[in-house]
Image: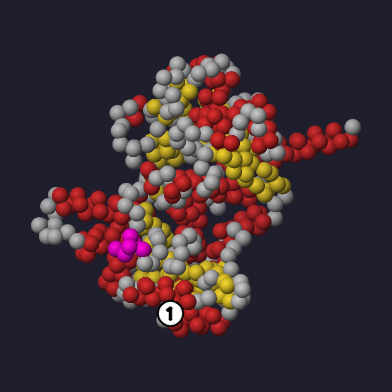
Amino acid sequence: MVRPTKYLFITGGVVSSLGKGIVAASLARLLQSRGFRVTIQKFDPYINLDPGTLNPYEHGEVYVTEDGAETDLDLGHYERFLDQPTSQANNVTTGRVYETVIRRERMGEYGGRTVQVVPHITDEIKRRICLLGETGNYDIVLTEIGGTVGDIESLPFIEAARQLHYERGRGESLFIHLTLLPYITVTGELKTKPTQHSVKQLLELGVQPDILVCRTEHRLSSEIKSKIALFCNVPVDSVIEARDAETIYDVPLKLMREGLDEAVLRRLGLAPTPEPDMDAWRDFLKRLKNPLDEVNVGLVGKYVELPDAYKSILESFVHAAAANEAKVNVTLIHSEDVQEENVERYLAPLDGVVVAPGFGKRGVQGKLIAIQYCRTRRLPFLGICLGMQMACIEFGRNVLGLSRCNSTEFDASTPDPVISLMEDQLEVTQIGGTLRLGNWTCDIRSGTLAERIYGTSRVVERHRHRYEFNNRYRETFEAAGLVLSGINPDNNLVEIVELPGHPFFIATQYHPEYRSTVMRPHPLFVAFVAAMIRHRRHQEAQQSGDDSR
């Protein structure tokens, strides 16, 4: 007999950025480790159909799923913690909900009735909440509701969750509320009043939270837990401490010690299960926190003021660091700051450089200068998406002598468009949702660095781009020594370029960072970190030799 899917709703209060996504991913990991089939979805209250057109400064990274959905960056956390893919169904926005309802109204599907937030918008939200559960693939679906309680934009989502909670009956769903306990340094006190007010706001919306997860800098005493429980109408064992952690990957184990997963199982009426099997997770943390080597990598990008713009890349370095038992220190370098006269100061102290993705002309000159430095100084280099395109332009200018070669994204009149608009993009006028997105196959040439890294001749990777390497220049570039080592078999698109004889120089049109997880670090990042370790050891050996003389 198939048991009905249980639904968990995770809301936030007091302030934003408390870490609902990390709490959701951590809880899901614990439940998964107990043998439950679990997935997480994110409901975002903004009116954009998806974050694809948002400036990275506005929203951070756009995370791309296997099926080509441009989604909230929290889906990256979901995949990294659960080691399973998400899809378009895992991220829903207000814009997507209203688009569907308005389209149905135009088709006359509401029989002439007045279309309203309740019931039509809330019914559509409930339908989308249940989509993943109705597949039969999951025992538990966690739904993270974006924003904070009290936000106007979030009200329809909370109302829909309230209705679903009532309709499904006792023990079929529950609410987890993440809140903040601020610490007043002057008096040395943790204050519970913001949490009480946050819960009061939820109660005014008809929602009684079942479990409170309290973000705090300090340990919660039994007295504080009892006070919160009394004033917020929850059992004491459902007041969960979520103290600040050294790394986000500590959070699952911290919440397990607090008994969050056990509290969830009790409230859902699920039979006791064996303790979560977190041995592999502990092994990952052990390797991460006890490094044998240390390297410094520079991330050259144009949105470095907001590190979340490169969230998946930064987390991929964490995964690869643990795989290599190394500490990887990432320095964010603004590409607009890199000039010919200061590149040595920026890059000489590093053991490797990654040139990050991006759109638009701003800052590309600094990326070209950084790539030339890596190529000529034999510094390990990894280019991603725009980073690959910049590597090709740098090679064209400084090796082939094509001094004005460029991408048509930056110079439509360039005489040598070594990077140009993809053919299927020529007639595209709409910006949102029209990039080349999602999974595409890449065939890898035998005997190349890419083949050694992957250990196979065919891979599938995720994409998000509109411009590509111009195949008219393939023979010219290869004759000069740049190996085009990865090709898409369907449209002959260049996917990987590399430079033989260099300690490590490789760049990809796709985004390898989207596929790196705790349990499966991406091989490109693992190999890149290993190359940086070799580079550092070589530099230290040379320095030692010079000192002995």
Residue 224 appears at what percent x and percent y? Answer: 54, 80
Q: Is residue 86 visible?
A: yes
Quarter of the image for the N terminus: give it.
bottom left
Residue 343 appears at what percent x and percent y? Answer: 65, 32
Q: Is residue 374 visible?
A: no
Residue 421 appears at what percent x and percent y? Answer: 39, 27
Q: What span is in magenta? A: 151-156
Residue 254 appears at what percent x and percent y? Answer: 57, 67
Residue beneath the point at 62% across and 44% down: 331
Give whichever of 59, 442 is nearer the camera: 59
Quarter of the image for the C terminus: give it.
top right
Residue lying farthest to the left in this orientation: 112
Q: How is the image coloured?
A: secondary structure
Q: In the rendered view, would you say 314 is above or below 25?
A: above
Residue beneath the point at 38% across and 50% down: 87
The amino acid sitting under disc 1 is Cys
Prevailing secondary structure of the magenta residues: helix
- Horizontal side of 211 relative to 429 (left or right) equals right
Question: Does dot 1 land on a helix, a strand or a loop?
Answer: helix
Residue lying farthest to the front in this orientation: 186
- Horizontal side of 491 relative to 536 (left or right) equals left
Give whichever of 21, 524 is nearer the camera: 21
Q: Which residue is mark 1?
A: 232
Give whichever of 283, 481 is nearer the camera: 481
Residue beneath the point at 59% across and 36% down: 337
Residue beneath the point at 57% across and 71% down: 183
Instruction: Kindly indicate the quadrant of the structure image that contains residue 69.
Output: top left
